[in-house]
Image: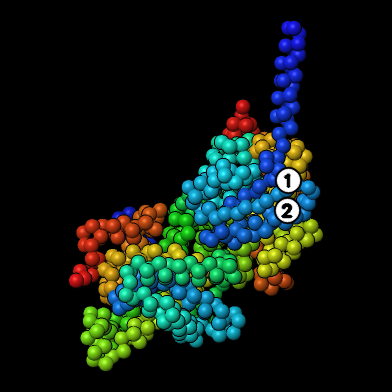
């Protein structure tokens, strides 16, 4: 059998593919964080909790209302997005003129409250959620067995990520958005409703987290603490990619997934630490992140 | 004159001696601190359930003992656990610390309690180090340990033909110990271990590790982890077609809450070793139903049941000698056998190990399960004498000296 660095080649390819799947989740979540930071200047610590809510909405729809995976894939992001809009309107919007720290504290507190409530009602062990009928089973790729559902995760998240990137970088709406970030007063003078735009942006970015949540439900256990473990890694990814950089967050998300996959092969014990080592190195060499630009 | 002096001195000495023997319960109240994971991956198997179980034990005990219960979250961090323990003992006057899942935290707490003569009974922790190199006269290990788990599941699986193993191990004290113990049992029974991979605590994605296990070609993948780590690994092994591919999963430490989280579709057929199953006898059912009423219908795990049994036994011993010194109560506990819904003729040995029967169970299929939480078929009872490490093998200084 062919080996690369002492690891059988099929095993290595398998690890890279799995890394890419995890990277897809990272990309979806870090994209939302980057958009929120870019447009609202808020570090959204509630992102992990909202991701968890996405998964729980899916579970709730299935067990209590009998609504399956495919409708939930649309409904869960909508519900989470709506909750996001309420949070933005009633709380976050009051903090825009203050220091970043206030937004961070508010969202961190919200995350603790949301997770605490869910733990209280559902415990931490989690709820079962099976993949939809059409995506059960898997393909034998020769070098590994790929569960059909995981293949779908890559496809779905890449479509959503690049769709979002196109929306922001290549459309009229995206242009308004970027302008509103740079010069809000000027954009307002042109008759564009900036506060509304901010609300919708937060709602949309949070819906992305909800989408990642329902996408994750059949893979991981649907549990109130599922966001806790992920969110810290995702923050590290946003920092590595450069705060506020849309493309940077997508590319870094996928890249970190790959690096983690490799680490799990060569040095499994370090797999949860490697992201932070990379973050430290990037902060030393390029304090604005790999794709970030210094802000004036 | 000389005689009088001698008499006085003797009286004084006798007075001192009886004074020590009559050491009463400090500040008139017994304080029990339930220390466990209340928010992380072990919160369902211990957490609030253990507090409820402790409270039930106190209520059922009745009597005129004044008992107060405190609880705290150690977050699975040894430094957090030992500083809470120290604060409880120094400032709050806690007399008994109970539960403490997560072996690394239990080992840290053991240091504190043995230094301060405070009783410590662990229901949640698994490592046998607590009754070997790091044993203490103030400590009792109640519910299970890595030795008992490996004897139950390891032996049963090898006997069914699973003779080559690959371990998926949680990378801390508990996982290492469980892996080492099971490896020994597998090899003693003629099997072999072809490899292992160590994963960090609270891993979300196990697919990389599962892929390595898959390519090892081992017949059995032993999961030397617990709680959310075990359920995630089983769920993902299922989607990667590991069981369909002919490999067998052995969850070395599985709790009933894990089976509940997985659902019977995924968990069916798993073989587990447990110290307690709620639906075993009338007494266990009676306790479990009362527990369920306070816990939204959840049935107790072996950790919860162990907490109840341990607190009840502790209170009896403390009332008997009217003392709450750690070593004094534990010494008294060792003289009386444990007989309740949890253990029949349980015995606390010199090394602090409470030995009792363990059960080898298999998870039912969805068709077999007739009511909520009806999850296990009991395959075999492992007698106390076989289930736990023999006393002569213990490296505990209380035994070897």
Q: Residue at x 23, y 91 (%)?
A: A190
Tag 2's secondary structure? helix
Q: Residue A166, relative to residue B82: is it above or below?
A: below
Which quadrant of the structure image shows residue B187? top right
The dot on residue B57 is 2
Q: Quadrant of residue A26?
A: bottom left
Chain at numbered mark 2: B
Where is residue B360 drawn, in percent x and y?
Answer: 67, 55
Query: Given contact means CB atoms under 8 Å apart, are the residues at marks 1 and 2 in contact?
Result: yes
Label placed on residue B315: 1
User: Can you name the residue that lies furthest to the bottom here?
Assistant: A191
For the question of whether residue B43 can be seen, the reply is yes
Spatial separation of the CA atoms under disc 1 and disc 2: 9 Å
Q: How is the image coloured?
A: rainbow
Does residue A98 lie above or below B139 as drawn? below
Where residue B208 appears, as percent x and y from the top left, is 42, 62
């Amino acid at each position: 059998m062919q080996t690369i660095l002492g690891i059988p080649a099929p095993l290595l390819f398998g690890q890279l593919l799995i890394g890419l799947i995890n990277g897809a989740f990272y990309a979806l979540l870090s994209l939302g964080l980057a958009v929120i930071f870019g447009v609202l200047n808020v570090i959204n610590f509630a992102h992990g909790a909202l991701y968890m809510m996405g998964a729980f909405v899916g579970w709730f729809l299935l067990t209590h209302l009998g609504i399956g995976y495919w409708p939930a894939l649309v409904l869960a992001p909508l519900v989470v997005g709506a909750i996001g809009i309420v949070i933005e309107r009633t709380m976050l919007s009051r903090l825009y003129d203050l220091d970043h720290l206030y937004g961070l504290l508010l969202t961190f507190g919200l995350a603790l409250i949301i997770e605490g409530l869910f733990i209280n009602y559902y415990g931490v062990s989690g709820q079962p959620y099976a993949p939809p009928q059409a995506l059960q089973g898997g393909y034998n790729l020769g070098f590994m067995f790929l569960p059909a559902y995981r293949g779908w995760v890559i496809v779905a998240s890449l479509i959503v990520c690049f769709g979002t990137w196109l929306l922001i970088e290549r459309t009229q709406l995206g242009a308004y958005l970027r302008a509103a970030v740079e010069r809000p007063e000027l954009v307002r003078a042109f008759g564009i409703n900036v506060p509304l735009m901010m609300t919708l942006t937060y709602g949309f970015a949070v819906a992305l987290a909800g989408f990642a949540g329902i996408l994750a439900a059949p893979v991981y256990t649907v549990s109130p603490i599922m966001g806790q473990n992920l969110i810290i890694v995702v923050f590290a990814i946003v920092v590595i990619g450069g705060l506020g950089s849309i493309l940077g967050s997508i590319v870094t998300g996928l890249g970190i997934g790959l690096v983690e996959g490799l680490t799990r092969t060569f040095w499994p014990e370090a797999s949860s630490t490697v992201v932070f080592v990379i973050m430290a190195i990037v902060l030393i060499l390029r304090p604005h992140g790999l794709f970030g630009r210094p802000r004036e | 004159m000389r005689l009088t002096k001698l008499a006085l001195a003797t009286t004084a000495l006798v007075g001192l001696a009886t004074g020590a023997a009559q050491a009463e319960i400090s500040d008139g109240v017994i304080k029990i601190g339930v220390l466990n994971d209340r928010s992380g991956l072990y919160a369902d198997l211990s957490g609030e359930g253990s507090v409820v179980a402790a409270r039930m034990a106190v209520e059922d005990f009745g009597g005129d003992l004044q008992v107060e219960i405190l609880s705290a979250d150690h977050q699975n961090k040894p430094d957090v656990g030992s500083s809470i323990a120290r604060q409880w003992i120094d400032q709050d006057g806690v007399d008994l610390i109970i539960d403490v899942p997560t072996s690394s935290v239990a080992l840290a707490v053991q240091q504190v309690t043995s230094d301060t003569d405070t009783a410590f009974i662990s229901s949640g922790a698994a490592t046998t180090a607590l009754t070997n190199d790091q044993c203490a006269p103030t400590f009792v290990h109640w519910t299970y340990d890595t030795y008992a788990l490996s004897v139950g599941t390891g032996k049963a699986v090898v006997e069914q033909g699973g003779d080559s193993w690959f371990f998926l191990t949680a990378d801390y004290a508990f996982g290492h110990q469980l892996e080492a113990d099971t490896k020994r049992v597998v090899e003693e029974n003629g099997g072999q271990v072809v490899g292992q991979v160590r994963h960090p605590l609270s891993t979300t994605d196990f697919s990389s590790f599962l892929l390595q296990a898959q390519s090892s070609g081992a017949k059995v993948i032993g999961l030397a982890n617990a709680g959310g780590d075990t359920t995630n690994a089983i769920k993902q092994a299922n989607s990667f077609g590991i069981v369909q591919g002919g490999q067998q999963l052995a969850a070395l430490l599985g709790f009933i809450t894990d089976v509940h989280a997985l659902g019977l579709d995924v968990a069916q057929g798993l073989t587990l070793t447990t110290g307690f199953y709620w639906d075993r006898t009338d007494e266990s059912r009676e306790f479990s139903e009362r527990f369920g009423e306070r816990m939204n219908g959840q049935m107790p795990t072996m950790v919860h049941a162990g907490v109840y049994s341990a607190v009840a036994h502790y209170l009896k011993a403390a009332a008997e000698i009217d003392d709450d010194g750690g070593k004094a109560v534990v010494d008294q506990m060792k003289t009386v056998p444990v007989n309740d819904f949890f253990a029949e003729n349980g015995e606390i040995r010199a090394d602090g190990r409470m030995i009792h029967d363990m059960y080898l169970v298999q998870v039912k299929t969805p068709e077999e399960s007739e009511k909520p939480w009806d999850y296990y078929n009991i395959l075999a009872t492992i007698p106390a004498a076989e289930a736990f490490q023999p006393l002569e093998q213990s490296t505990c200084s209380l035994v070897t000296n």
